[in-house]
């Protein structure tokens, strides 16, 4: 059942703006502390669209293997790799997720204790194809420096996959934000996966009311199921001034105490500054483009705002997000994040659908029928 393959079929980014090309990559040997996993699900992200077009702020060298949000099943465990980051025993056949590998040696790792800012992180989804460190592949090779978490048995593959990027990012961001009070109204700008998990986190963290601003209607419908008391559809309410009035009306005329930017649209930064209440906190998580725009910094001073940036996450956030999924899975339809499953050889269709905004979270699905059955059976546990 768990044979080690000689090669892995993989969709490789060779030229910006061109379709990914299917290649057969030799599977690297599994050394001390390393692992080989079968990719079960690989999420397709807005970042992947930018990466394939060459419009990311940091461009990884070509060619590279994309796919930075993966749920894998262990096929081979290197010597010495016996436990996950939470202390649970690991064995062949287990489902795991993993963070980018920080070096543990630089200033940010050792002194600042902020491994997401590590000076030499080894990323998944950005490396040369020969490393086999990307999810748009049948198999992935996990380095010895990579921390992993075992996916709880009760959790289905579809419930877990959002942890791989959006949810762990949100858990990390909300830690930087600090807690929420019952008086805090929270406006979430953006209704993609990061926005949806933000609504969920705000609702579960004790916010007074959560308001999600975004589009399309399909995403906003899920935002309501995930804890948003109000949604504002920007396809219907296109004028930012009108949206501002609607939000003031929902927040006692003062504006929200907390705004969480998850849209990635630079103009959303100014919209957040305008609507936020005096003394408010502004968590900025969605901005990954290099685009600029005029800003009035005096608003930050005048309103006495706290502006907090947060990027990515590290292994504790994966662990916490998975514990959340395990304990709240009956309360929220978490699997509804996954809108379409694509076989690996249709990854270019998945990227096109993501780019067109037709999806919430498309996934590359490499599972056998038996593995899909097994995942569905997990949903019946608990
Ligand atoms: Zn992602
Ligand atoms: Zn480091």
Image: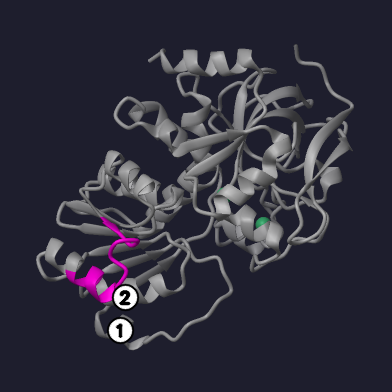
Circle 2: element type: helix
Q: Earlier in the sequence, mark 2 or mark 1?
A: 2
**CA distance for labels 2 and 1:** 7 Å
Q: Is residue 288 above or below residue 131?
A: below
Name the residue beneath numbered marker 2: 273
What residue sits 69% from the left and 38% below the top? 346
Quarter the N terminus occupies: top right
In-front residue for pair 4/120: 4
Q: Please tell me how crowded label 1 is: few (under 14), some (14-19), or many (20+) other residues with Cα within 10 Å.
A: some
- Look at the image and tell me whether residue 299 can be seen: yes
Tag 2 and tag 1, C-beta contact below 8 Å: yes
Q: Is residue 152 left or right of residue 137?
A: left
In-front residue for pair 106/260: 260
What x and y, as percent, mark residue 93? Answer: 66, 17
What residue sits 75% from the left and 31% below the top? 138
Q: Is residue 282 left or right of residue 33?
A: left
What x and y, as percent, mark residue 306? Answer: 33, 72
Q: Is residue 341 left or right of residue 238?
A: right
In-front residue for pair 348/189: 348
Name the residue beneath numbered marker 1: 299
Q: Quadrant of residue 29?
A: top right
Quarter the C terminus occupies: top left
What residue sits 46% from the left and 68% below the top? 265
Circle 1: element type: helix
What residue sits 57% from the left and 55% below the top? 355
What x and y, as percent, mark residue 231? Answer: 26, 53
């Amino acid at each position: 059942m768990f044979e080690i393959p000689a090669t892995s079929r993989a969709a490789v980014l060779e030229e910006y703006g061109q379709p990914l090309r299917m290649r057969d990559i030799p599977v690297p040997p599994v050394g001390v502390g390393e692992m080989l996993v079968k990719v079960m699900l690989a999420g397709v992200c807005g970042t992947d669209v930018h990466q394939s077009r060459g419009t990311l702020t940091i461009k990884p060298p070509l060619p590279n293997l994309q796919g930075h949000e993966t749920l894998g099943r262990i096929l081979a465990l290197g010597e010495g790799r016996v436990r996950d980051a939470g202390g649970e025993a690991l064995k062949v056949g287990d489902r795991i997720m993993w963070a980018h590998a920080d070096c543990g040696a630089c200033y940010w790792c050792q002194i600042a204790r902020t491994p997401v800012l590590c000076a030499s992180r080894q990323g998944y989804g950005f490396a040369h194809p020969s490393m086999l460190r990307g999810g748009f592949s049948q198999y992935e090779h996990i380095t010895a420096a990579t921390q992993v978490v075992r996916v709880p048995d009760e959790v289905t593959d579809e419930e877990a996959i959002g942890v791989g990027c959006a949810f762990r990012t949100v858990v990390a961001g909300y830690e930087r934000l600090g807690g929420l009070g019952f008086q805090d109204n929270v406006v979430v700008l953006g209704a993609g996966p990061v926005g949806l998990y933000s609504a969920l986190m705000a609702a579960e963290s004790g916010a007074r009311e959560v308001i999600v601003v975004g589009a399309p209607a399909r995403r906003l419908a899920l935002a309501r199921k995930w804890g948003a008391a109000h949604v504002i559809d920007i396809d219907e309410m296109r004028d930012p001034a009108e949206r501002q009035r609607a939000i003031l009306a929902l927040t006692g005329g003062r504006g929200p105490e907390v705004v969480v930017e998850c849209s990635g649209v630079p103009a959303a930064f100014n919209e957040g500054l305008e609507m936020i209440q005096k003394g408010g906190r502004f968590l900025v998580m969605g901005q990954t483009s290099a685009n600029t725009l005029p800003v009035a910094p005096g608003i930050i001073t005048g309103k006495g705002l706290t502006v907090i940036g947060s990027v990515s996450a590290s292994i504790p956030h994966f662990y916490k997000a998975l514990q959340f999924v395990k304990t709240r899975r009956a309360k929220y339809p978490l699997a509804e994040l996954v809108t379409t499953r694509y076989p690996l050889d249709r990854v270019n269709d998945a990227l096109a659908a993501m780019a067109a905004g037709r999806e919430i979270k498309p996934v590359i699905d490499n599972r056998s029928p038996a593995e899909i059955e097994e995942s569905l059976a997990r949903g019946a546990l608990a």
